[in-house]
Image: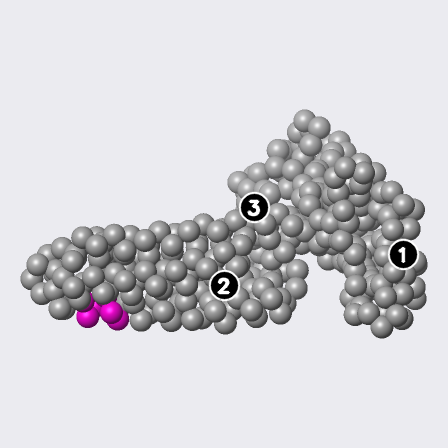
Amino acid sequence: MGTLNTVILILSSVFVVIAWLHLKLRDYKKFQMWMGAVVACALAFLVIKSFEYKAKFDHYGIKLADNSIVTGHGLDDTIRYEGITSVDIDVARFNGEFLNTITDGSKPTFQLLVNGEPSGDPVELSVRSVAKIADDINAKLREKADADGKKWFPAMSVKLVSFVASEPFAIQMPRKKLRLQLPDAAKFRDQSLLKGTISAQTPGVTMKSLDLIDLRATDSETAEGSLVWKYISHAEETKKQFMEHRDHVAQKAAEGEEASFDDMLSQPLEHGEGHHYTSIVVPWEDARLYSNFTPKWNTYYALYFLITGLHGLHVLIGACVLFYFGFMSKKLWEKDPEHLTNRVEVAGLFWHFVDLVWIFLFPILYLM
């Protein structure tokens, strides 16, 4: 797709020169035709780039605890906590997010914990009910301060309230929605802390179809000792294929043929007729990092999206300017053709700049 986009941009630079030439020849109709071709090339470039971006967002990688890496498709990081009986809530930040993750049709009610004991009537938690409970507590604290002859300050308001559930319940959500995952507790981004245990139904992060095993950075003493082989399906067969490939590359190197370290410890997995789909389940404690191929995954993709995103923005802006000159400048053409020609020439120089930048980006990001 990068190669195709390179061809499209080069053609668009040729077309913008031809469009400008027809202005010089005072042929407005042909100018519009070729300017339309330039805009069409720009739109084609952006559409192809969107497919390229989508492929990055649909492709995932998991880095294991020993720095072994697997990549593929169909990542699922659903995590379930069971047996939750108590909830700690940050009053100022509470947004009720955890309430939307309660599963199994449970609608538990909660009692306020005071000195470790349930107090008051059971209530259904919501942002409003938590705020009311906090206001009631603060009112009592102010009354006590007044009775003791002390001055009350807003900073003395209650910050954290704890509740106990009327019955144990379960929550389920994507792992990325949590701020902190612990074996016996889950903390949400609003600082709500729920105490329960991770369910055996969600033992770890899952990837349904692997397309690459990369052991170049593994901390294991040998490739055979990598954690990958412990958690993937068809482990023995896949491991045998991997080692045979490694030995083949090593043999080629010994015979003087070109072979690299990367080839020895990084191997694509084949799918289709005669080949199985290899999946993996990595326990939560052994999943050091997982992400789609976006800036979170590594520095390369951070630079890739930054640079190509800025370039794409320049393409979009340039296409809008050229479209304006091509199809909304009839009055200027009739009034002063030379003025329009000069404007198109300047816009064309900008378009050549966009093309030139891509000529540098293509080998740096796609070939090197």
Q: Position of residue 116 (x, y in %)?
A: 77, 46
Q: Quadrant of residue 14?
A: bottom left
Q: Is residue 160 visible?
A: no
* Residue picked out by circle 3: 95
Which badge, 3 or 2, comes first in the chain's sequence? Answer: 3
* Residue picked out by circle 2: 308
In space, the residues marked 2 and 1 are separated at their CA atoms by 37 Å
In space, the residues marked 3 and 2 are separated at their CA atoms by 36 Å
Q: Position of residue 300 (x, y in %)?
A: 62, 66
Magenta stretch prevailing secondary structure: helix
Apparent side of residue 175 relative to residue 351 in the rendered image (left or right): right
Say what amino acid the circle numbered 1 marks.
Met
In space, the residues marked 3 and 1 are separated at their CA atoms by 51 Å
Front-most of residues 338 and 309: 338
Specify few, some or many for label 2: CA neighbours under 10 Å numbering under 14, 14-19, or 20 or more: some
Q: Residue at x 18, y 53 (%)?
A: 29
Which badge, 2 or 1, comes first in the chain's sequence? Answer: 1
Which badge, 3 or 1, comes first in the chain's sequence? Answer: 3
Q: Is residue 248 visible?
A: yes
| Label 3 with label 2: CB-CB less than 8 Å | no
Tell me the element at label 2.
Answer: helix
Apparent side of residue 115 relative to residue 35 in the rendered image (left or right): right
Tell me the element at label 3.
Answer: loop
- The part of the chain drawn in magenta is 341-346
Say what amino acid the circle numbered 2 marks.
Thr
Q: Position of residue 117 (x, y in %)?
A: 76, 42
* Residue picked out by circle 1: 243
Say what amino acid the circle numbered 3 marks.
Asn
Front-most of residues 182 and 11: 11
